[in-house]
Image: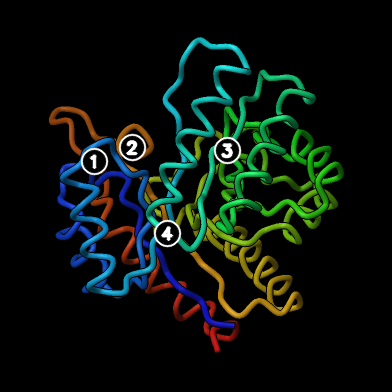
Amino acid sequence: MEIKYICPFWGQDKTTASTFIENALSAGFDGVEVNVPDDNAFEDDLLKTINETGCVLIAQQWLPPKDESVAEYMIRFRERMERLITFNPVFINSHTGKDFFSFSDNCKIIKQANRISKISGVKIVHETHRGRFNFSTFATQVYLDKFPNMQINADISHWCNVSESFLEDQQETLELAFKHSYYIHARVGHTQSAQVNDPFAPEWKETLDIFVGWWKRILINANARGDKEFYICPEFGPYPYMPYFTNPFEPMQDQWDLNVKMMNYLKKELIEFDK
């Protein structure tokens, strides 16, 4: 199995596509994850640079909040997916459904995603995230039982935040989720936030070890499945995910440097899985 490291466009929104991709590849990433903006110049630049460099592209599906019915949401969801498919990503990482939609309605959305994936041939993974159908372990388990072939992007920081714990009493559901995990957002969170200020600070050492342990268990499952490639995206974000100092109002860490540092750390820590 080969691990490919992905750089998030989140937080680099003022950068052109070509500059962003060139910076990511120069830093040692294998590819990028982009929630493609509605900007023709950016789209053209993105496609041109992807084709010229051979950079891996993971498309991100994220819809801005809107007061709407489930039917209206599904129209927006389908239109967004169809647009992202035109960029020929290796897969789409999707923020799917809403935490307050009923189980039945979220199932309709997941079935829609399955149809889109089957017709297009583009795999769709569903990111575990606050505000989505899979916002917690207990909420996710019923969907994994309903859809045994579902593939998820494990961003476990959100589950810690929602449950205000490191999931010590939810091991069975965690193990089930690990079996369904085909992508990792490698961000370290804690019981009160989805992002620590610096995962490499001494006070977060125990927390970092917990997350790395989870990621290793996901890779063990991927290896057992016979996966040839696995994708990991260090995804420390900008404000308000990134804690800030006040007076002056400045980030505690440089987001770009933190994601590069996490990538380099994981290349060493996970070397046993990267053949």
N-terminal of the two: label 2 or label 1?
2
Depth check, front residue: 107 or 169:
107
Disc 4 or disc 2, which is closer to the eye? Answer: 4
Reading the image, the residue beneath label 2 is 243
Question: How many angstroms separate mark 2 from mark 3 (CA)?
Answer: 19 Å
The reply to whether dot 4 and dot 2 touch (C-beta < 8 Å) is no
Question: How many angstroms separate mark 1 from mark 4 (CA)?
Answer: 35 Å
The reply to whether dot 3 and dot 1 touch (C-beta < 8 Å) is no
Reading the image, the residue beneath label 4 is 88
The reply to whether dot 1 and dot 4 touch (C-beta < 8 Å) is no
Disc 3 or disc 4, which is closer to the eye? Answer: 4
Q: Amino acid at mark 3?
A: His
Q: Residue at x 51, y 51 (%)?
A: 92
N-terminal of the two: label 1 or label 4?
4
Depth check, front residue: 48 or 158:
48
Callout 1: SS: strand
The reply to whether dot 2 and dot 1 touch (C-beta < 8 Å) is yes
Quadrant position of the N terminus in the picture? bottom right
Reading the image, the residue beneath label 3 is 129
Q: In the image, residue 195 lies at what x, y percent?
A: 45, 43
Reading the image, the residue beneath label 1 is 251
Disc 3 or disc 1, which is closer to the eye? Answer: 3
Depth check, front residue: 22 or 162:
22
N-terminal of the two: label 2 or label 3?
3
Question: How many angstroms separate mark 4 from mark 2 (CA)?
Answer: 35 Å
